[in-house]
C-alpha cells in the first residue's frame, strides 16, 4: 500500500510494472531510382569481357541478314527489267554471303600469327589482279570504271575491294614489326614503305577511275598512321598531299564535278545529272516514320538508279521508314564501337593496328555511302558494307569482320570467360546402365579442406 503519497519499495513477491520503451522510428530505406538502376545494370553489362565479341558477331550478322532482305526487295524490278528471274540478284548475294560466312568463320578461328603470315600473299595477289584489270581483253569496264575481271558467266570480281584488306593486314604487320624494334619514333620508318605502297594501290585504283574506293583506301592509310602515333605535322603533310591529288582528280573529271555540284540540289539539273541524288531523297522522304512496307517501294520501279547497290539505303528508308534507317545506323555504330574497344584494350600492336584499320574501313565506307544518299556528301559509288549487293565487296568485308571476332576472342578477359563455359553440344546422355555423373565442381581449397577429417594433416 501507499501511505502519505509515498511509494512502498517492491518486495520479493511483487513484480515491478514494466515501462514500455519509447518507440524508435525505423529508418525507411530510400527508394532507388529505377532509371539509375537500369543505367547501372546497362553499364555493368557493357563492361563485360564478351561485350565486344557479341557486338561484332551480332551486329555483323544482323546487318548481313537485313541486307539480304533488302537486296531481294530492291532488286526484283531490276531483274525483271533484264528478263531475269525476280530472285536473280538475291541468289547471287546469298551465295556470296554463304562463302563470306565460311571466310568469316575461318578468319575468326585463325591465330594471330597466321593472319600476319597472310599479309604479304594477299598484298601481292591484290596488286597482281589490279594490274591485270588494266590489260585489254582481261579487265572489264562497268559504269565507266574499268576495275572488274570476269570469272565466267555472270560472275565478276573487283580486285580493288581486296586491296583494302591487303592494306590493313600488310600495314598492321609492318607497323607492328617496326614498333617491336622501336623504329616508329623516326618519321622515315613511319612513312616508308607504308605510304609508297599505299600510293601504289591508289594509283592502280585511280587508273581504273574508281574514286570512291580510293577515298576508302586513303581513310585506312590515315587510320593506320594515327594509330601509329604520327606527329601532327607529318600527319598534316600527308593529308595535304593526298588532298591535293584528290582535288586534281576531281577537277579533271566532268563526271566528278557534276556529282560535286549536286550537293543540296532541288531539281535534276541539266541533262538530269542530279537525278539519282534527288530521287534518293524522294525515297527517304516518302518513307515517313515506319515506311510504306517491305516490298512497297515506288522509287525502285525505274526512278532510282542502282537501287540495290549504292542506293539501297534509300530503298530501306522508303520501305522501313526512319525506324529502319536508324536501326541500320545503330548497328554500324555498335560495330564501330566494338572495333575501337578491341583496338584499345589489346597489348598486341598487330591486333591494335589491324582492328583499327578494319574499323576505319567499315565505318568510313558506311558514312560515305549514307552521306551520299542523304545528300550530305557527293555520290562516291561505294556500296554499304555488308548490306549492298555485290559479292566482291562482301567477301573481303566478312573476312575482315572475322578478324575482329578473332581479336575480340583473344582478349584475356574474353578468353577466360569463354573457357569457363560448359560445352552445350557433344555431352553424353546417361542411359539405363550408365551412371549419371555429378556436375563438375571447382577444385578450391575450401572444398578440399571441408572434405578432410579433423585429424587429417
Image (cartoon, rainbow, N blue to C red):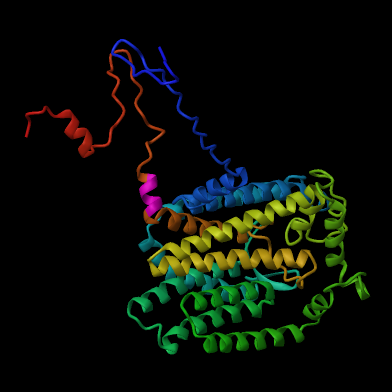
By secondary structure, the bulk of the magenta-drawn segment is best described as helix
The quarter of the displayed image where residue 147 is located:
bottom right
Measuring from the top left, give residue 262's x and y in whole percent: 84, 74
Q: Is residue 23 above or below residue 3?
A: below
Q: Nearer the viewer, residue 81 or 210?
A: 210
The quarter of the displayed image where residue 388 is located:
bottom right
Q: Residue furthest front?
A: 4
Measuring from the top left, give residue 139's x and y in whole percent: 64, 71
Measuring from the top left, give residue 288's x and y in whole percent: 84, 51
The C terminus lies in quadrant = top left
Q: Is residue 181 above or below residue 115?
A: below
Would residue 202 be found to the left or right of residue 441 on screen?
Answer: right
Residue 84 can be seen in this image: no
Q: Residue furthest top?
A: 13
- Which region shows up in magenta? 413-418
Residue 106 can be seen in this image: yes
Question: Would residue 298 be counted in the magenta stretch?
Answer: no
The N terminus lies in quadrant = top left
The quarter of the displayed image where residue 266 is located:
bottom right
Q: Is residue 451 above or below residue 260?
A: above
Q: Nearer the viewer, residue 443 or 316?
A: 443
Tell how many labels: 0
Q: Residue drawn 62% across and 50% down?
A: 64
Q: Residue drawn 37% across and 83% down?
A: 183
Measuring from the top left, give residue 13's x and y in whole percent: 30, 10
Amino acid at each position: 500500500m501507499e501511505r502519505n503519497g509515498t511509494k512502498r519499495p517492491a518486495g520479493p513477491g511483487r513484480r515491478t510494472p514494466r515501462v514500455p520503451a519509447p518507440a524508435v522510428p525505423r529508418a525507411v530505406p530510400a527508394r532507388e531510382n529505377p532509371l539509375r538502376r537500369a543505367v547501372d545494370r546497362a553499364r555493368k553489362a557493357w563492361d563485360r569481357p564478351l561485350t565486344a565479341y557479341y557486338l561484332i558477331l551480332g551486329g555483323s550478322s544482323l546487318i548481313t541478314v537485313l541486307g539480304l532482305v533488302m537486296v531481294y526487295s530492291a532488286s526484283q524490278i531490276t531483274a525483271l527489267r533484264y528478263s531475269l528471274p525476280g530472285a536473280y540478284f538475291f541468289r547471287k548475294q546469298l551465295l556470296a554471303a554463304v562463302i563470306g560466312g565460311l571466310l568469316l568463320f575461318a578468319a575468326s578461328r585463325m591465330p594471330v600469327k597466321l593472319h600476319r603470315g597472310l599479309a604479304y600473299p594477299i598484298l601481292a595477289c591484290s596488286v597482281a589482279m589490279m594490274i591485270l584489270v588494266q590489260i585489254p581483253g582481261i579487265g572489264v569496264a562497268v559504269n565507266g570504271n574499268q576495275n572488274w575481271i570476269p570469272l565466267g558467266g555472270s560472275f565478276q570480281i573487283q580486285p580493288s575491294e581486296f586491296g583494302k584488306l591487303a592494306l590493313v593486314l600488310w600495314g598492321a604487320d609492318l607497323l607492328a614489326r617496326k614498333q617491336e624494334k622501336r623504329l616508329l619514333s623516326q618519321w622515315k620508318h613511319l612513312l616508308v614503305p607504308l605510304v609508297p605502297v599505299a600510293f601504289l594501290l591508289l594509283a592502280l585504283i585511280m587508273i581504273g577511275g574508281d574514286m570512291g574506293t580510293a577515298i576508302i583506301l586513303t581513310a585506312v592509310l590515315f587510320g593506320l598512321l594515327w594509330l601509329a602515333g604520327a606527329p601532327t605535322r607529318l600527319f598534316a603533310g600527308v593529308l595535304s598531299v593526298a588532298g591535293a591529288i584528290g582535288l586534281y582528280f576531281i577537277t579533271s573529271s566532268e563526271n566528278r564535278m557534276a556529282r560535286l555540284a549536286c550537293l543540296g540540289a532541288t531539281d535534276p539539273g541539266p541533262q538530269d545529272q542530279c537525278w539519282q541524288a534527288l530521287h534518293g531523297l524522294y525515297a527517304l522522304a516518302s518513307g515517313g516514320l515506319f515506311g510504306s512496307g517491305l516490298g512497297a517501294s515506288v522509287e525502285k520501279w525505274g526512278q532510282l538508279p542502282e537501287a540495290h547497290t549504292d542506293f539501297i539505303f534509300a530503298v530501306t528508308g522508303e520501305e522501313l521508314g526512319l525506324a529502319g534507317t536508324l536501326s541500320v545506323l545503330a548497328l554500324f555504330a555498335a560495330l564501330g564501337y566494338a572495333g575501337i574497344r578491341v583496338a584499345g584494350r589489346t597489348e598486341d600492336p598487330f591486333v591494335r593496328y589491324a582492328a583499327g584499320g578494319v574499323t576505319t574501313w567499315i565505318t568510313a565506307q558506311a558514312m560515305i555511302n549514307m552521306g551520299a544518299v542523304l545528300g550530305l556528301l557527293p555520290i562516291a559509288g561505294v556500296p554499304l558494307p555488308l548490306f549492298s549487293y555485290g559479292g566482291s565487296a562482301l567477301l573481303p568485308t566478312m573476312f575482315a569482320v572475322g578478324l575482329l571476332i578473332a581479336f575480340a576472342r583473344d582478349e584475356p578477359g574474353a578468353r577466360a570467360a569463354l573457357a569457363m563455359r560448359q560445352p552445350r553440344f557433344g555431352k553424353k546422355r546417361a542411359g539405363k546402365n550408365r551412371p549419371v555423373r555429378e556436375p563438375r565442381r571447382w577444385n578450391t581449397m575450401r572444398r578440399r579442406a571441408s572434405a578432410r577429417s579433423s585429424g587429417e594433416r
